[in-house]
Amino acid sequence: MNPVGASPVPGAGPAWAGWTALAEHPWAYPALEVTHLLGIGLLLGSLAVLDLRVWGRAAALPVRPLARLSLACSATGFGLAASSGLLMFATQPQELLANRAFVLKMGLLFLAGLNAAIFHARGSLDRLDSVARAQTLASLALWVAAIACGRWIAYL
């Protein structure tokens, strides 16, 4: 943990005292963790529903309306996870940047985002082919691996 008044970023000057207060408050940091987990659950759950549809489950449901709902829920979940994650990161950036599990998690999140961009850029929702199915498996694997790395941060 950074000393009070120390900069969370080397050479950036004094830190905002709120970062220290946030990290040391008896319920603020745990509330951020709960928000982070809720965001992850919403993100991954809604992606899993869309992935199942890409794989042919619930074929009676039209893909486009389901995708709009799923992606709106995913975006909301990502927003919750990202905003709470950034606040948690701000309380101890040096320690997290030195943590292999955190760095790997960030790389996996980047790859998950890249996979999603490619999925939509190639029109996978209109094709529902083997490439689209492979991308949903890659997406699920990347998100689960990122979650696992997130849990490992505390142990490395």
Image (cartoon, rainbow, N blue to C red):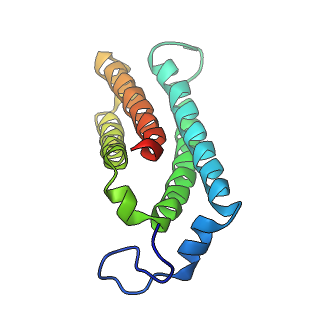
Q: Residue 114 at what x, y percent from top left?
A: 30, 42
Is residue 127 visible in the rendered image? The answer is no
Quarter where residue 23 is shown: bottom right
- Residue at position x 30%, y 45% in the image: 107
Task: Determine whether 87 is above or below 109 in the image.
Answer: below
Quarter where residue 127 is shown: top left
Quarter where residue 156 is shown: top left
Q: Is residue 133 left or right of residue 76?
A: left
Q: Farthest residue toward the right? A: 27
Q: Residue 148 at what x, y percent from top left?
A: 44, 34
- Residue at position x 38%, y 22% in the image: 137
- Is 154 in front, or is 44? 154
- Is 41 in front, or is 145? 145
- Is 27 in front, or is 60? 27
Q: Residue 28 at what x, y percent from top left?
A: 67, 62
Q: Residue 61 at what x, y percent from top left?
A: 59, 20
- Is 139 in front, or is 105? 105
Is residue 118 visible in the rendered image? The answer is yes
- Residue at position x 62%, y 67% in the image: 24
Picture mark count = 0
Q: Is residue 59 left or right of residue 8?
A: right
